Amino acid sequence: MKIRLMAVLGAHALGCLLFIALSWLGFYLYTQLFGSLGSRGVAGGLALLLVFYVYAGTNLLLAVLPPGWWKPALCCLLGAAVLAYLLPQHPLRAIYFSVLSGGLSWLAVLASARLVERLRG
């Protein structure tokens, strides 16, 4: 049981690190292609910090939940919530971060299941 929990938490922690790295990469590519960001001030950064906190909390919840149908549903719900939160003000960021958060969460679920299977056998 401890090995399963450690493997799952490690896979989801790696997903959180990838979220930060891919967020930075997305902003870097955007500024290289289109110039500076359209919004100024701290509001955009604080919104994305909130998105990261929700992403990290959801991944912690996904890590401790037993396998079942609610894991993909929770990943889809996370992507939809991020899309609904960012869409009115930042449509391009909304699409990028909803796919990033939902997709990385699902990849972390799949990687943790694969890792637990590999450690058991």
Image: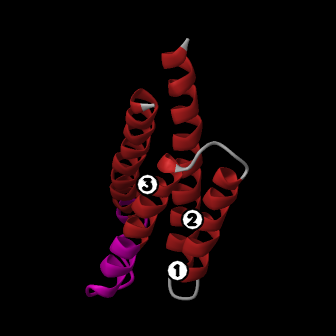
The one of 40 and 16 positioned closer to us in this rendering? 16
Magenta segment, which residues?
31-50
Question: Which quadrant would residue 6 be assigned to in this image?
Answer: top left
Q: Which residue does the numbered mark 2 point to in the structure image? A: 98
Q: CA distance from mark 3 to mark 2?
A: 18 Å
**Mark toward the start of the polypeptide (3 vs 2):** 3
Q: Are marks 2 and 1 in contact (CB under 8 Å)?
A: yes
Q: Residue 40 placed where, x, y %? A: 30, 86
Q: Residue 94 placed where, x, y %? A: 54, 73
Q: Which residue does the numbered mark 3 point to in the structure image? A: 60
Give the residue at x 39% y 82%: 38
Q: CA distance from mark 1 to mark 3?
A: 22 Å
Q: Is residue 65 left or right of residue 13?
A: right
Question: Which quadrant would residue 3 be assigned to in this image?
Answer: top left
Kind of element beneath mark 2: helix
Of badges 1 and 3, the one in the foreground is 3
Of badges 3 and 2, the one in the foreground is 3
- Name the kind of residue labelled 2 in the image: Ser
Q: Is residue 48 above or below residue 17?
A: below
